[in-house]
Amino acid sequence: MAKSTLSFVCQNCGAAYNRWQGKCESCGEWNTLAEEDTSGSVPVSIRSKRKGRTFALESLAGKSPDAPRLSSGMTELDRVTGGGFVRGSVLLVGGDPGIGKSTLLTQATSLLARAGHRVVYISGEEAVAQVRLRAERLGLSDAPVQLAAETSVEDIVSTLSEGAVPRLIVIDSIQTMWTDTVESAPGTVTQVRASAQALIRFAKKTGAAIILVGHVTKDGQIAGPRVVEHMVDAVMSFEGEGSQQFRILRAVKNRFGPTDEIGVFEMTGLGLREVTNPSELFLSERDLGTPGTAVFAGIEGTRPVLVELQALVAPTSLGTPRRAVVGWDPSRLSMVLAVLEAHCGVKLSGHDVYLNVAGGLRIHEPAADLAAAAALVSSLVNAQLPTDAVYFGEISLSGVVRPVAQTPARLKEAAKLGFQRAVLPESARGDAGGDAGLSLNAVNSLTTLVAEIAARGSRRGESGAQPEKNATPARFRRGEG
Ligand code: TYD
Ligand code: MG
């Protein structure tokens, strides 16, 4: 009989302590320690002192009987996985509740099942009837997906070991699974880790691909241990703003494919629709003719994506002005604001600043600096930017506009969508090629751009920009705005 050993396990990082404490020393999180019985966390088979069996060693160049990748039939999903589900791989899909994870996976499994593959959908959260109801709504009831509402990993593994090996197994969700080998409650770190381990072992042994659904905590991490992220082959996150219809599937980690690709979907009354040209979607509801908006020509993976940045700069009534940003890195915004203050004479310390990326997209590229700066200055001086212009370029701390990668792809996409001009780094003009079809406005430093925009408008509010005399036009100066 194993002695019961109680430890306090951090629910965030999995570190174990033998007494309770308020803060986890390993990851620095507060109030994450929970009491768990960890005596059984090592399976009996490993603890026993049996003699190891011998196994055959193989060469790298072996032939697999089946195609190593299984295309899901959904282009956007395949783009993110890197061309389909790899045999024997385990993929974790995370996302907020209600974002559409179950919908996406119901659609993907149905397509595969219709194509003749054995596909199993295990729901630990919803009853069979609920899953059926969703399938009915999606018009997929006729797809031969094998369905069950189960939570015991041992039962699942024994059931799936019978008959032909399934090509794809969906476990919705990993937090509801539990295994006999450990004693903690379902949803605890120890249970989630042990359940994931058992399922990963099954995938590697049989060659079935497994998708684990994972919940996301308030601060955007996949709930439970980060260790699961390390154990699986790929981690995808399914994102979107609650009020928006757009959903973005992003690879966070991928052992078999790229990590910078995104898949774009739209949630409709009949399930998720793939969006093959995201720029059209993100620009479909543009606020033409309003100051404070600029179109950014971005790149997501291999695909150019045009998106509108919206800024609002307004005099503050608070001691400390507000800085709020949705869809972009707040520290990047602080940096752009600091460069505007230090090098372009744009004083923003008396203004609240809001920045929003339209359509619920989250931008990670530094190339968005120039578009953000243009939108901010445009809002401050109340000057509308040309509606047919796109912006891209990274801003350095010295105020110089630096070149970014893939200039031709950005310009081509802008031209395709009917834009006439591009504001881009001076040094990128050479990469642009002669046949871009756009008139190029190459800017060397941020000061030039600020001066150009300021020349178009009048200042909003009273106490605003007080630039250096030679850097910016007269309009900025106190009393003349
Ligand atoms: P769901 O897939 O259950 O989310 P998750 O598994 O990530 O928690 O999706 C739930 C939401 O999606 C719910 O608010 C209803 C909406 N929805 C649609 O708008 N259209 C549809 O066809 C379906 C099936 C769901
Ligand atoms: Mg669900």
Image: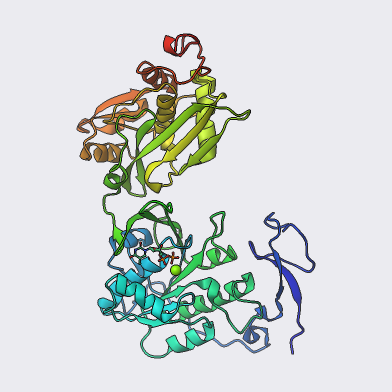
Which quarter shows the N terminus?
A: bottom right
On screen, residue 58 above or below 262: below
Residue at 55% of width from left, 58% of height from top? 221
Q: Is residue 117 left or right of residue 217?
A: left
On screen, residue 165 above or below 287: below
Compare residues 84 and 293 and report the one nearer the observer.
293
Indicate the quadrant where residue 46 lies: bottom right
Residue at 76% of width from left, 82% of height from top? 4
Compare residues 356 and 167 and report the one nearer the observer.
356
Q: How many marks?
A: 0
Q: Is residue 82 visible?
A: yes
Q: Position of residue 365 (x, y in %)?
A: 43, 41
Q: Position of residue 122 (x, y in %)?
A: 44, 78
Which quarter shows the C terminus?
A: top left
Q: Is residue 397 visible?
A: no
Ligand 2: image quarter: bottom left
Residue at 47% of width from left, 28% of height from top? 313
Residue at 30% of width from left, 74% of height from top? 136
Which residue of the protein is positioned furthest toward the right in this rendering? Answer: 19
